Image (cartoon, rainbow, N blue to C red):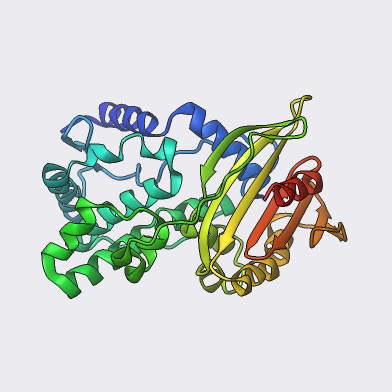
Amino acid sequence: MLASARYDEALSQATYREYPRSLRSIDAALYTRLGLMPRGLRAQLVPDARVSRAWYDSQARRLLLRRAPAAQRTRVVNELVRALVDQNFNLRRITGLRVHDRDRALAAKSIVDGTAALASGITASPVQGPPLERFLRFESGLGAGKALAKELRYLGGSRALASALQLFPQTTEQLLHIDKFLERERALPVRLPARIGDWKLSASETFGELDVRSLLRAFSVPNAVSTAYGWAGGRVGLYVSPTGQTTAVLVLRWDTIDDAVAWRDAVPRYVGAAFPGATARDCPPLDRCWSSTWDLATGVLGATSVFASGPAPDTVAAALFNQK
């Protein structure tokens, strides 16, 4: 039980330990070029749920409670369940996972949070606010984790649910679809070259089905869930030019060519919402380019799609196709 100031300090330290400054800087650059943050805005990217008055710190293995105002009973129960999951399945396995595999970390965290929510009765609050806030809330995965936990428990009881806590879903595709989890279907590999001409790859993260779904939903793109359903693998990265300019790329592999076409058809709606006033133009061999706050380019080759945002996006995107 901690006074408000000490509770906030402990929570802040734990939050930034799990989400270091270097990773926040990379995400800020990516989110800006994906249209989630206005250019020049220095947003403070902090994980969700830090407004609660109870929180289980898996590193210190302590349940932190704010002295006043006191936490609601459901929230305390929720964090006690997370503590029990830690006691039996060791939540420290998730520590540092976000740095190495964004999608896998989201899947692991979501099934733990979903299991706790299933016991406590906590539900996700309504999603609202600017695009970045909406994206992060959709991406938190509480609803998806709770749904998978509930379905596993229904099909196979506590033993089936325990299997998901012992062997976390490896991707958010497995989190979102129980058949993918039971089959342990892996993502198709996506490799970004270390260099594209003079441009150097400075950062790269996995980008899963939940990320694709959340990006489209953040801008109210129709059929976001069905469009993301065909995801088979993805990676997002930042390329830096010799003059210090940065371009973001999003490379996605799809189950079928039709799935890639569905994404291609959704991109203009996404661009229109994320980059108001963007002017379209043809840019063969890519499908479409735009001039906006950032220059944009998109293309589909077979069951692979590329989206680039920043200086010289058409050059970078075309090079990614050529290196396949």
User: Where residue 27 appears, x then y in whole percent?
Assistant: 55, 39
User: Where residue 212 appears, x then y in whole percent?
Assistant: 54, 59
Name the one closer to the observer, 268 or 302.
302
Please identify the quarter of the rendering in which residue 70 is found. Answer: top left
Which quarter shows the N terminus?
Answer: top left
> Where is 258 relative to 243, above or below?
below
- Residue at image position (39%, 30%) is 16
User: Where residue 238 appears, x then y in whole percent?
Assistant: 64, 37
278 displayed left or right of 112: right
> Where is 153 relative to 95, above or below?
below
Please identify the quarter of the rendering in which residue 124 is found. Answer: bottom left
- Residue at image position (58%, 46%) is 236
- Residue at image position (34%, 27%) is 13
Name the one closer to the observer, 142 or 111.
111
103 displayed left or right of 130: left
Q: Does the rendering let one see residue 322?
A: yes
- Residue at image position (77%, 25%) is 242
Name the one closer to the observer, 10 or 31.
31
User: Where residue 113 appears, x then y in whole percent?
Assistant: 27, 53
292 displayed left or right of 115: right
Please identify the quarter of the rendering in which residue 303 is found. Answer: bottom right
